[in-house]
Image (tube, helix red, strand yellow):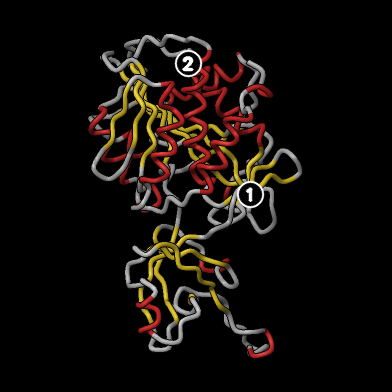
Amino acid sequence: MATSKIINAKSQKFLEKYLNNPSPTGYEWEGQKIWMDYIKPYVDEFITDTYGTAVGVINPKAEYKVVIEAHSDEISWYVNYITDNGLIYVIRNGGSDHQIAPSKWVNIHTKKGIVKGIFGWPAIHTRDKGKEEPPKLDNIFVDIGAKDKAGVEKMGVHVGCVITYPDEFQVLNKDKFVCRALDNRAGGFMIAEVARLLHENKKKLPFGLYVTNSVQEEIGLRGAEMITQTIKPNVALVTDVCHDTTTPMIDKKKEGETSIGSGPVISYAPAVQNKLRERIIETAEAKKIPFQRLASSRYTGTDTDAFAYSNGGVASALISLPLRYMHTTVETVHKDDVENVIRLIYETLLNIKEGETFSYFD
Protein backbone atom coordinates (compact mmCIF):
# COMPACT_ATOMS: atom_id res chain seq x y z
CA MET A 1 0.00 0.00 0.00
CA ALA A 2 1.68 3.23 -1.13
CA THR A 3 1.67 5.95 1.52
CA SER A 4 0.93 8.63 -1.04
CA LYS A 5 -2.49 7.11 -1.66
CA ILE A 6 -3.75 6.95 1.92
CA ILE A 7 -4.83 10.53 2.60
CA ASN A 8 -7.01 11.59 -0.29
CA ALA A 9 -8.95 14.81 -0.89
CA LYS A 10 -12.07 13.50 0.86
CA SER A 11 -10.24 12.26 3.93
CA GLN A 12 -8.20 15.47 4.27
CA LYS A 13 -11.42 17.48 4.06
CA PHE A 14 -12.78 15.34 6.91
CA LEU A 15 -9.61 15.91 8.92
CA GLU A 16 -9.90 19.67 8.48
CA LYS A 17 -13.59 19.74 9.45
CA TYR A 18 -12.96 17.44 12.42
CA LEU A 19 -10.05 19.51 13.74
CA ASN A 20 -11.76 22.85 13.29
CA ASN A 21 -14.78 21.76 15.31
CA PRO A 22 -14.26 22.45 19.05
CA SER A 23 -14.28 19.32 21.20
CA PRO A 24 -13.24 20.31 24.75
CA THR A 25 -13.12 17.71 27.50
CA GLY A 26 -16.67 17.04 28.66
CA TYR A 27 -18.17 18.59 25.50
CA GLU A 28 -17.01 16.20 22.79
CA TRP A 29 -20.32 15.18 21.24
CA GLU A 30 -20.43 17.49 18.19
CA GLY A 31 -16.98 16.27 17.14
CA GLN A 32 -18.06 12.70 17.75
CA LYS A 33 -21.02 13.18 15.40
CA ILE A 34 -18.66 14.37 12.65
CA TRP A 35 -16.40 11.36 13.25
CA MET A 36 -19.27 8.87 13.31
CA ASP A 37 -20.77 10.29 10.13
CA TYR A 38 -17.44 9.80 8.34
CA ILE A 39 -16.88 6.17 9.38
CA LYS A 40 -20.52 5.07 9.12
CA PRO A 41 -20.04 3.44 5.67
CA TYR A 42 -17.10 1.42 6.98
CA VAL A 43 -18.54 -0.17 10.14
CA ASP A 44 -21.45 -2.46 10.96
CA GLU A 45 -22.80 -0.71 14.04
CA PHE A 46 -22.03 1.86 16.72
CA ILE A 47 -21.70 1.77 20.49
CA THR A 48 -21.94 5.01 22.46
CA ASP A 49 -21.90 5.62 26.18
CA THR A 50 -23.25 8.10 28.71
CA TYR A 51 -20.27 10.47 28.49
CA GLY A 52 -19.88 10.47 24.72
CA THR A 53 -17.31 7.85 23.71
CA ALA A 54 -18.12 6.51 20.24
CA VAL A 55 -17.19 3.08 18.90
CA GLY A 56 -17.62 1.83 15.34
CA VAL A 57 -17.81 -1.96 15.33
CA ILE A 58 -16.81 -4.27 12.48
CA ASN A 59 -17.90 -7.91 12.79
CA PRO A 60 -19.75 -7.34 16.10
CA LYS A 61 -20.76 -11.00 16.64
CA ALA A 62 -17.18 -12.21 16.95
CA GLU A 63 -16.14 -13.33 20.43
CA TYR A 64 -12.51 -12.23 20.08
CA LYS A 65 -12.31 -8.44 20.22
CA VAL A 66 -9.58 -6.05 19.13
CA VAL A 67 -9.69 -2.31 19.86
CA ILE A 68 -7.96 0.44 17.92
CA GLU A 69 -8.32 3.60 19.96
CA ALA A 70 -7.68 7.34 20.10
CA HIS A 71 -9.12 10.14 22.22
CA SER A 72 -11.33 12.91 20.94
CA ASP A 73 -11.08 15.68 23.53
CA GLU A 74 -8.98 18.83 23.44
CA ILE A 75 -7.66 21.02 26.24
CA SER A 76 -9.66 24.11 27.16
CA TRP A 77 -10.45 26.54 29.97
CA TYR A 78 -13.39 27.15 32.30
CA VAL A 79 -14.70 30.54 33.37
CA ASN A 80 -13.84 30.56 37.07
CA TYR A 81 -14.35 34.13 38.34
CA ILE A 82 -15.81 37.34 36.92
CA THR A 83 -14.55 40.64 38.33
CA ASP A 84 -16.74 43.67 39.04
CA ASN A 85 -15.23 45.45 36.02
CA GLY A 86 -16.06 42.56 33.68
CA LEU A 87 -12.79 40.66 33.34
CA ILE A 88 -12.74 36.86 33.48
CA TYR A 89 -10.30 34.59 35.31
CA VAL A 90 -10.01 30.96 34.27
CA ILE A 91 -9.07 27.48 35.44
CA ARG A 92 -7.82 24.61 33.32
CA ASN A 93 -9.89 21.87 31.71
CA GLY A 94 -7.03 19.52 30.92
CA GLY A 95 -3.41 20.60 30.56
CA SER A 96 -3.91 24.07 29.09
CA ASP A 97 -0.69 26.08 28.84
CA HIS A 98 -0.90 29.42 30.65
CA GLN A 99 2.27 30.70 28.99
CA ILE A 100 0.79 30.79 25.49
CA ALA A 101 -2.44 32.52 26.55
CA PRO A 102 -1.61 36.26 26.43
CA SER A 103 -2.85 37.94 23.21
CA LYS A 104 -4.79 34.85 22.06
CA TRP A 105 -8.38 35.06 20.83
CA VAL A 106 -10.84 32.67 22.50
CA ASN A 107 -14.35 31.35 22.01
CA ILE A 108 -16.54 31.20 25.11
CA HIS A 109 -19.30 28.64 24.67
CA THR A 110 -22.65 29.80 26.06
CA LYS A 111 -26.31 28.89 25.63
CA LYS A 112 -26.61 32.03 23.49
CA GLY A 113 -23.80 30.87 21.20
CA ILE A 114 -20.13 31.75 20.93
CA VAL A 115 -18.91 34.88 22.72
CA LYS A 116 -15.57 36.14 21.43
CA GLY A 117 -12.86 37.20 23.86
CA ILE A 118 -9.14 37.84 24.15
CA PHE A 119 -6.53 36.95 26.72
CA GLY A 120 -5.30 40.42 27.64
CA TRP A 121 -1.80 41.30 28.84
CA PRO A 122 -0.25 44.57 30.09
CA ALA A 123 1.75 46.46 27.46
CA ILE A 124 5.54 46.14 27.57
CA HIS A 125 5.79 49.89 28.36
CA THR A 126 3.93 49.43 31.64
CA ARG A 127 5.77 46.42 32.99
CA ASP A 128 8.64 46.54 35.48
CA LYS A 129 11.62 45.63 33.32
CA GLY A 130 13.66 44.77 36.39
CA LYS A 131 11.25 42.09 37.47
CA GLU A 132 9.11 40.85 34.60
CA GLU A 133 5.98 38.99 35.70
CA PRO A 134 5.54 35.85 33.57
CA PRO A 135 2.08 34.59 32.56
CA LYS A 136 0.67 32.43 35.36
CA LEU A 137 -2.68 30.84 36.04
CA ASP A 138 -3.52 33.52 38.60
CA ASN A 139 -2.73 36.51 36.38
CA ILE A 140 -4.01 35.63 32.91
CA PHE A 141 -7.49 36.94 32.18
CA VAL A 142 -10.05 37.15 29.39
CA ASP A 143 -11.55 40.41 28.16
CA ILE A 144 -14.86 40.18 26.24
CA GLY A 145 -15.35 43.93 25.93
CA ALA A 146 -17.94 44.15 28.71
CA LYS A 147 -18.18 47.20 30.96
CA ASP A 148 -18.85 45.26 34.15
CA LYS A 149 -19.93 41.91 35.61
CA ALA A 150 -23.57 42.54 34.72
CA GLY A 151 -22.49 43.13 31.11
CA VAL A 152 -20.65 39.81 31.06
CA GLU A 153 -23.67 37.96 32.40
CA LYS A 154 -26.00 39.69 29.92
CA MET A 155 -23.87 38.22 27.11
CA GLY A 156 -24.59 34.74 28.51
CA VAL A 157 -21.21 34.16 30.12
CA HIS A 158 -21.21 32.60 33.58
CA VAL A 159 -18.95 30.56 35.83
CA GLY A 160 -18.52 27.12 34.27
CA CYS A 161 -18.67 28.19 30.62
CA VAL A 162 -16.00 26.39 28.63
CA ILE A 163 -13.43 28.34 26.60
CA THR A 164 -11.58 27.13 23.51
CA TYR A 165 -9.14 28.60 21.01
CA PRO A 166 -10.48 29.27 17.48
CA ASP A 167 -7.23 28.48 15.61
CA GLU A 168 -7.95 26.35 12.53
CA PHE A 169 -6.24 23.79 10.33
CA GLN A 170 -3.42 24.89 8.03
CA VAL A 171 -0.73 23.17 5.99
CA LEU A 172 2.87 24.34 6.47
CA ASN A 173 5.37 23.83 3.64
CA LYS A 174 3.06 21.36 1.84
CA ASP A 175 3.53 18.39 4.18
CA LYS A 176 3.10 19.62 7.79
CA PHE A 177 -0.37 19.71 9.32
CA VAL A 178 -0.77 22.52 11.86
CA CYS A 179 -3.71 23.03 14.21
CA ARG A 180 -4.80 23.06 17.82
CA ALA A 181 -6.17 19.68 18.96
CA LEU A 182 -4.01 17.47 16.77
CA ASP A 183 -3.57 15.97 20.24
CA ASN A 184 -5.41 13.78 19.66
CA ARG A 185 -7.99 14.22 16.97
CA ALA A 186 -5.19 13.24 14.61
CA GLY A 187 -5.58 9.85 16.31
CA GLY A 188 -9.32 9.80 15.68
CA PHE A 189 -8.60 10.58 12.04
CA MET A 190 -6.01 7.80 11.77
CA ILE A 191 -8.21 5.05 13.20
CA ALA A 192 -11.05 6.24 10.95
CA GLU A 193 -8.74 5.87 7.96
CA VAL A 194 -7.85 2.33 9.06
CA ALA A 195 -11.57 1.47 9.02
CA ARG A 196 -11.89 3.04 5.56
CA LEU A 197 -8.93 1.10 4.16
CA LEU A 198 -10.19 -2.21 5.53
CA HIS A 199 -13.54 -1.57 3.85
CA GLU A 200 -12.14 -0.35 0.53
CA ASN A 201 -9.60 -3.18 0.34
CA LYS A 202 -12.32 -5.72 1.23
CA LYS A 203 -10.35 -7.15 4.14
CA LYS A 204 -12.28 -9.61 6.31
CA LEU A 205 -10.88 -9.78 9.83
CA PRO A 206 -11.23 -12.99 11.87
CA PHE A 207 -12.23 -10.98 14.95
CA GLY A 208 -14.43 -8.09 16.00
CA LEU A 209 -12.78 -4.71 15.50
CA TYR A 210 -13.82 -1.86 17.80
CA VAL A 211 -12.78 1.48 16.35
CA THR A 212 -12.91 3.53 19.54
CA ASN A 213 -12.86 7.30 19.93
CA SER A 214 -12.76 7.93 23.68
CA VAL A 215 -13.61 11.07 25.63
CA GLN A 216 -11.94 12.72 28.63
CA GLU A 217 -8.37 11.50 28.16
CA GLU A 218 -6.97 14.93 28.96
CA ILE A 219 -8.21 14.79 32.56
CA GLY A 220 -7.07 11.26 33.42
CA LEU A 221 -7.96 8.62 30.78
CA ARG A 222 -11.56 8.59 32.01
CA GLY A 223 -13.33 7.76 28.76
CA ALA A 224 -11.07 4.79 28.10
CA GLU A 225 -11.60 3.56 31.66
CA MET A 226 -15.34 3.50 31.05
CA ILE A 227 -15.50 2.06 27.53
CA THR A 228 -13.05 -0.78 28.14
CA GLN A 229 -15.46 -2.15 30.72
CA THR A 230 -18.21 -2.10 28.10
CA ILE A 231 -16.20 -3.67 25.26
CA LYS A 232 -14.09 -6.10 27.34
CA PRO A 233 -11.47 -6.42 24.58
CA ASN A 234 -8.77 -9.05 24.19
CA VAL A 235 -6.30 -6.67 22.51
CA ALA A 236 -5.98 -2.88 22.39
CA LEU A 237 -3.87 -0.89 19.92
CA VAL A 238 -3.85 2.70 21.13
CA THR A 239 -2.64 5.70 19.17
CA ASP A 240 -1.81 9.10 20.64
CA VAL A 241 0.81 11.78 20.11
CA CYS A 242 4.29 12.12 21.59
CA HIS A 243 6.86 14.90 21.59
CA ASP A 244 9.22 15.84 18.81
CA THR A 245 12.25 16.42 21.02
CA THR A 246 14.47 17.99 18.36
CA THR A 247 13.16 21.55 18.80
CA PRO A 248 14.86 24.05 21.18
CA MET A 249 14.74 23.83 24.99
CA ILE A 250 13.99 20.09 25.19
CA ASP A 251 16.51 17.83 26.92
CA LYS A 252 16.91 14.60 24.91
CA LYS A 253 18.66 12.92 27.84
CA LYS A 254 15.42 13.35 29.76
CA GLU A 255 12.76 13.11 27.04
CA GLY A 256 14.42 10.73 24.55
CA GLU A 257 14.90 11.47 20.86
CA THR A 258 11.93 11.36 18.50
CA SER A 259 11.17 13.66 15.58
CA ILE A 260 8.48 14.42 13.05
CA GLY A 261 9.09 12.91 9.64
CA SER A 262 10.92 9.87 11.04
CA GLY A 263 7.95 7.54 11.40
CA PRO A 264 5.56 6.22 14.06
CA VAL A 265 6.88 5.90 17.61
CA ILE A 266 6.58 2.54 19.36
CA SER A 267 6.61 2.75 23.15
CA TYR A 268 8.27 0.65 25.84
CA ALA A 269 6.50 0.75 29.22
CA PRO A 270 5.09 -1.69 31.80
CA ALA A 271 1.58 -1.22 30.36
CA VAL A 272 2.81 -2.14 26.88
CA GLN A 273 2.53 -5.90 26.44
CA ASN A 274 5.92 -7.02 25.15
CA LYS A 275 4.79 -9.72 22.73
CA LEU A 276 2.19 -7.45 21.18
CA ARG A 277 4.78 -4.69 20.82
CA GLU A 278 7.18 -7.10 19.11
CA ARG A 279 4.40 -8.09 16.70
CA ILE A 280 4.04 -4.42 15.77
CA ILE A 281 7.79 -4.08 15.25
CA GLU A 282 7.91 -7.26 13.15
CA THR A 283 5.07 -5.88 11.05
CA ALA A 284 6.84 -2.55 10.56
CA GLU A 285 10.04 -4.27 9.50
CA ALA A 286 8.27 -6.67 7.14
CA LYS A 287 6.27 -3.88 5.49
CA LYS A 288 9.22 -1.45 5.47
CA ILE A 289 7.40 1.12 7.58
CA PRO A 290 9.88 3.45 9.32
CA PHE A 291 9.52 3.66 13.08
CA GLN A 292 11.11 5.12 16.19
CA ARG A 293 11.32 3.86 19.77
CA LEU A 294 10.44 5.59 23.04
CA ALA A 295 10.93 4.48 26.64
CA SER A 296 8.06 5.69 28.83
CA SER A 297 9.25 4.70 32.30
CA ARG A 298 6.45 3.76 34.73
CA TYR A 299 3.43 4.69 32.59
CA THR A 300 2.67 5.97 29.11
CA GLY A 301 0.30 8.73 30.21
CA THR A 302 -2.10 7.64 27.46
CA ASP A 303 -5.24 5.53 27.22
CA THR A 304 -2.93 2.52 26.85
CA ASP A 305 -2.66 2.47 30.64
CA ALA A 306 -6.44 2.41 31.07
CA PHE A 307 -6.91 -0.50 28.66
CA ALA A 308 -3.92 -2.52 29.86
CA TYR A 309 -4.99 -2.63 33.50
CA SER A 310 -8.69 -3.29 32.90
CA ASN A 311 -10.74 -6.47 32.84
CA GLY A 312 -8.03 -8.55 34.51
CA GLY A 313 -5.44 -7.35 32.00
CA VAL A 314 -5.73 -6.57 28.27
CA ALA A 315 -2.78 -7.01 25.89
CA SER A 316 -2.17 -3.37 24.92
CA ALA A 317 0.37 -1.40 22.92
CA LEU A 318 0.94 2.20 21.92
CA ILE A 319 1.75 3.58 18.47
CA SER A 320 2.38 7.33 18.70
CA LEU A 321 2.43 10.17 16.21
CA PRO A 322 5.38 12.54 16.82
CA LEU A 323 4.21 16.12 17.27
CA ARG A 324 5.79 19.52 17.81
CA TYR A 325 4.51 22.17 20.25
CA MET A 326 2.04 20.01 22.18
CA HIS A 327 -0.81 21.80 23.98
CA THR A 328 -0.35 24.95 21.94
CA THR A 329 -2.49 26.27 19.10
CA VAL A 330 0.19 25.39 16.52
CA GLU A 331 0.62 21.68 17.15
CA THR A 332 2.50 20.32 14.12
CA VAL A 333 2.78 16.83 12.60
CA HIS A 334 4.25 15.47 9.38
CA LYS A 335 1.85 14.08 6.78
CA ASP A 336 4.17 11.12 6.12
CA ASP A 337 4.02 10.13 9.81
CA VAL A 338 0.22 10.31 9.79
CA GLU A 339 0.10 7.99 6.80
CA ASN A 340 2.68 5.61 8.29
CA VAL A 341 0.80 5.34 11.59
CA ILE A 342 -2.31 4.42 9.58
CA ARG A 343 -0.30 1.85 7.61
CA LEU A 344 1.23 0.35 10.75
CA ILE A 345 -2.11 -0.08 12.54
CA TYR A 346 -3.71 -1.49 9.37
CA GLU A 347 -0.92 -3.99 8.70
CA THR A 348 -0.71 -5.03 12.36
CA LEU A 349 -4.42 -5.84 12.39
CA LEU A 350 -3.87 -8.10 9.38
CA ASN A 351 -1.10 -9.80 11.38
CA ILE A 352 -3.24 -10.68 14.42
CA LYS A 353 -4.88 -14.09 14.55
CA GLU A 354 -8.19 -14.87 16.18
CA GLY A 355 -7.84 -16.11 19.74
CA GLU A 356 -4.23 -14.98 20.29
CA THR A 357 -3.45 -14.49 23.97
CA PHE A 358 0.05 -13.04 23.55
CA SER A 359 0.86 -15.04 26.65
CA TYR A 360 4.47 -15.33 27.79
CA PHE A 361 3.76 -18.93 28.78
CA ASP A 362 2.47 -20.40 25.54
In the rendered view, does 1 fall on the left or right side of 72? right
Where residue 356 appears, as percent x and y from the top left, is 35, 13
Residue count near mark 2 (Cα–Cα under 10 Å), binned few <14, some 14–19, many ≥20: some
Amino acid type at circle 1 is Lys
- Residue shown at 46% from the left, 82% from the top: 146
Amino acid type at circle 2 is His
For label 2, the SS is: helix
Q: Which residue is mark 2?
A: 199
Q: Earlier in the sequence, mark 1 or mark 2?
A: 2
- 19 shown above or below 278: below
Q: Nearer the viewer, residue 249 or 214?
A: 214
Can residue 340 be seen from the camera position used here? yes
Give how far apart the Cα atoms at labels 1 and 2 are: 40 Å
- 294 shown above or below 172: above
Can residue 359 be seen from the camera position used here? no
- Residue shown at 41% from the left, 54% from the top: 24
Quarter of the image with the C terminus in it: top left
Where residue 19 appears, as percent x and y from the top left, is 53, 45
Q: Work out which residue is located at the far right of the displayed protein and give it.
A: 173
Q: Nearer the viewer, residue 310 or 221?
A: 221
Question: Dividing the picture into quarters, in which one does residue 108 lie?
Answer: bottom left
In the rendered view, does 41 fall on the left or right side of 182? left
Numbered circles on residues, count: 2
Q: Which residue is mark 1?
A: 252
- Residue shown at 71% from the left, 38% from the top: 175
